[in-house]
Amino acid sequence: MTVEIDPAGIWDSEAIADVAAATFPLACPPGATQDDIATFIDDVLSAERFSEYLTDPDRTVLKVTHGGAIVGYAMLIDGEPADPDVGRVVTLRPTTEISKLYVLPGNHGTGVASALMDAIVERAVAAECAGLWLGVNQENVRAQRFYAKHGFTQVGTKTFVVGTQLHHDFVMQRAL
């Protein structure tokens, strides 16, 4: 599958929010309630929030397009981890967090996510980062396998709030 990966612009906020709303529930653990997922999407993944992310100098949003439609995205955050516990286990500096990396379900297994990861690594290397890190839900085995295949190893744990529920993530890191 031929895809294009480019930095997103403010004009992409609504389309990326639509992709986020479709993909985020797929990564949630089975115990996450629909109300909590909806609250998270409204609070964190709305078009308005993506407009904010796209104007934040410490964030980069990459979009994946196929046939003119956005089929996936990644959000990267440069700098020190905000959570001091994460900062202790993420040992490579400078670092970039892969805050979000999602591909629409019809594109799973087509190489789209791998192409997006390659673009993330290319960007981080160009920015002279020593490593990348991310959090992945402890019950999301499929995502953990994908990240391990791309050189990430588990270095710790962290919590992640979705609505009213506290979830547990693995922190994974990759040297560049």
Image (cartoon, rainbow, N blue to C red):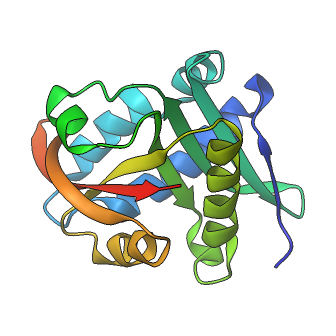
Q: Quadrant of the N terminus?
A: bottom right
The residue nearer to you, when weighing 65 against 120, is 120
x, y percent for residue 26: 39, 64
Note whether 21 is above or below 45 in the view shown.
below
User: Residue visible at 58% across and 63% down?
Assistant: 103
Note whether 25 is above or below 80 in the view shown.
below
Q: Is residue 73 left or right of residue 67?
A: left
Note whether 9 is above or below 174 in the view shown.
above
Asked where in the image residue 118 lies, by quadrant, the reply is bottom right
User: Residue visible at 65% across and 15% down?
Assistant: 55
Q: Is residue 108 left or right of residue 119?
A: left
Asked where in the image residue 137 lies, by quadrant, the reply is bottom left
User: Residue visible at 57% across and 17% down?
Assistant: 52
Q: Is residue 155 left or right of residue 42?
A: left
Total number of numbered discs in the rendering: 0
The residue nearer to you, when weighing 1 against 146, is 146
Name the residue at the bottom extreme.
109
x, y percent for residue 62: 69, 43
The residue nearer to you, when weighing 159 against 175, is 175
Instruction: Specify whether residue 108 is in view.
Output: yes
x, y percent for residue 117: 61, 61
x, y percent for residue 97: 44, 40
Instruction: Specify whether residue 163 is in view.
Output: no
User: Residue visible at 59% across and 65% down?
Assistant: 104
